[in-house]
Image (cartoon, rainbow, N blue to C red):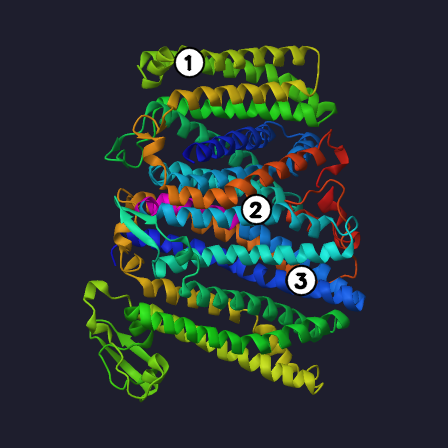
Amino acid sequence: MEWTPLILSRIQFAFTISFHIIFPSFTIGLAAWLTVLEALHLVTGRPAYRTVFEFWLKIFGVAFGLGVVSGVVMAFEFGTNWSELSRMSGPIQGPLLSYETFTAFFLEASFFGILLFGRPRVPPWFYLFSTAMVALGTTFSAFWIMVNNSWMQVPVGYAMVKGQFVPTDWAAILFSPVVWVRFPHMLLASYLTGASCVAATGAWYLLRGKYHAEARIMLRMGLFLAAVLVPAQLFFGHLVGDYVHDKQPAKFAAIEGRWHDEQPASEVLIALPDEAEQTNHFAISIPVLGSLIGSMSFTAKEVGLTDFAPQDRPPVAIPFFAFRIMVGCGILMLFLAWYGSYLRVKERLEETRWMLWAIFLGFPLPWIAILTGWFTAEVGRQPWTVYGVLRTADAVTPFLTVREATISLVVFGTLYSFIFAFGILYIYRLLRMGPSGRLIEPPVDAVPNRPMSVVDHRAPSTAPAGERA
Amino acid sequence: MILFWVAVLAISILLYVLLDGFDLGVGILFGTTRDEERRSAMLSAVAPVWDGNETWLIVTGVVLWGAFPPVYATLLSAFYLPLLLMLAGLILRGVAFEYRHRAEHARWIWDIAFAGGSLVAAFVQGLTVGALVEGLPIVNGRYAGGDFGWLSPFAVLCGLGLCLGYALLGACWLVKKCEGKTRDAAYRLIPRLAIGLLVFLVVVFVYALAAHLEVMGRWLQRPYLVVFPLVGAIAMARLAHGLLWRRDGVPFAMAALTFAAAFGTLAISFWPYMIPFSITIDEAAAPHASLAFMFWGEGLFVFPLMLIYAAINYRVFRGKVRPDAGHY
């Protein structure tokens, strides 16, 4: 492969946004779960809910902070590396992403501050309301991102005027059917991330024989929530597949590993796609299932990749395998959530240590699914940036040099590894320390937009004196 | 509608320069001392506000993209390497706040990251303004200067100048927020920084005259522009006055006013260009449908709320910082 500014920019964008998505996908789910916890605390009055809430609020603070830091880069990267895209689609993508920014800041500025420091100063119902508003804010943030990306997947509501995408129908853009299957798909993925991390942490504490009351709450709520959400997610995943089938047939064919038209079409479960030979090796397929999945019919014709000119085809290997990894993670999560919930109902979960281990070690599954799902969506959209209208090769900054692109890729790679290694280590330490039973005491001088500052005010027994001198 | 978004943009940039200006300046001054007590006081003086200050940079970025896409596309891609440096600097100094006091053996890394990151970010911002004043090579609405087309003695000079300027703002902020030896040290620094800044301004002026920069022509065409430097000069005089009488609140207000005057001078001398002297505001503005869509939500409601919130934040944080609030 030749290292062009285009491929370097694509790698850089993929790297920075993959790093970024780790944090918001976690905090969106966590915010919703915090709202549920606070509501339960208000209704039942059980102190354990409060302890669990305070504990996860600290984790939320750190993850939110890391999400903001890695998000700043995204606000600039469109202009630096994709100047032709931002010039042409600025009238549509610019307003959408500016709404995202304004929403996120507004959320951070107002209700998140109350969450961190306002407990002693506001009535309980208002505290619950603030929690719900934070959850709503993170959800809005995700909404704008999904509107923006869905517009790039299936552009609607625009006219080309003097080389610019000019919005003609904002309602069509905001209420595009594609948005309303992909946005729930992303939202459910985030909720599953939250649920599985919470359940995994509970399982971990039980395995270590610590914090029994809190661990049981985490495990139970995490598992039950996942048990309901995974099937819903599979359903929305199917709807997303339907839109891809209808609007992006080349991507669909790549995901399916289907090279030639078939009628009725078989479904390739696993294979080794060979782009040079335009065929699959070692394929295991099920006859007719391809038509059933694609068109809900036993006889439908399904299109193959060779229907498209070679320059209009996406790469096959990445969407093909990424999709299968995503689905595999989903099936594993389904098993963990259902069997775990079954054991929990039968009151046998805590003795079944291998299952606790499986739940604990299963915490990365939703993240892997989210990343591979995005790889499928984004690589499958190639060679287009705005599907069918603007090619990625025409979207990149035309005068970008290999030297510039290499330098920035190396700088971001090094910087992110350095910064986030510390951040993740820090979250791990917080998790390991566990809910100490101490409640957050608002620092005297703290202000809301410094989420991480809360974490510093932990119980004195856990903070070595030398560190704080 | 276009004017509304020009105003939002101008307010965001000015707020960014004033607010992040002083905390970047404190970061620069942080590197000039090894005294742990002073360093600690410096951190406390900016810790609760710095990331709120930085949000104005991101607001500037997204408003620029939504309301003036060609400017966003042209400038960001033209300043590829400088922006990379700036982002790296801002990220490093940002996390240094969080990680510094947690480190036991590696604190020096975060000290360097904090001071160095602040210095680099300030320098790059000055550099880009300098390159803009001098005029970027733009052909057919696209930047055509190559990897280092922004690099010139004048741009570097402006980079150094902004470091001085931010350091001055930072010193004035320390006078306002601190007591004891941190404040005294800042008081000693202010005259030197102010004189340095004046020397810089004279050099820039002479350079602009000698190089026949297009900006100079505008100043001659628009004599009323002299109002802004005049305000700046009066502010500097009041600053000196406040310095003599040791009125802790005065220097910062006056330094900020000087910056606002400089910003006004630049903005009006660019007008009606957004990228001088090749892309005008009207050419750059997004279609009405885009501007209106932004106006009825974020422009009319969220932006004013953000301004109010920022004001409340500073009000909560008013007065001197307590020395024992060291690590927030």
Query: Label 3: which residue?
Result: A34
Asked whether A7 or B101 is in front, the reply is A7
Residue at left 47%, top 42%? B295
Query: Label 2: which residue?
Result: A105
Q: Where on the picture, by quarter, is residue B148?
A: top left
Three-letter amino acid code at the position of disc 3: Leu
Would residue A406 be visible to someone looking at this image? no
Write down the chain letter for disc 1.
B
Q: Are marks 1 and 3 on the same chain?
A: no
Write down the chain letter for disc 2.
A
Asked whether B292 or B82 is in front, the reply is B292
| Region rendered in magenta | A69-87
Residue mark closest to the camera, 1 vs 3: 3
Q: Main secondary structure of the magenta part?
A: helix
Disc 2 to disc 3: CB gap under 8 Å: no
Disc 1/disc 2 C-alpha distance (Å):
40 Å
Query: Label 1: which residue?
Result: B203
Bin the neighbour count of mark 2 within 10 Å (Cα to Cα): few under 14, some 14-19, many 20 and up: many
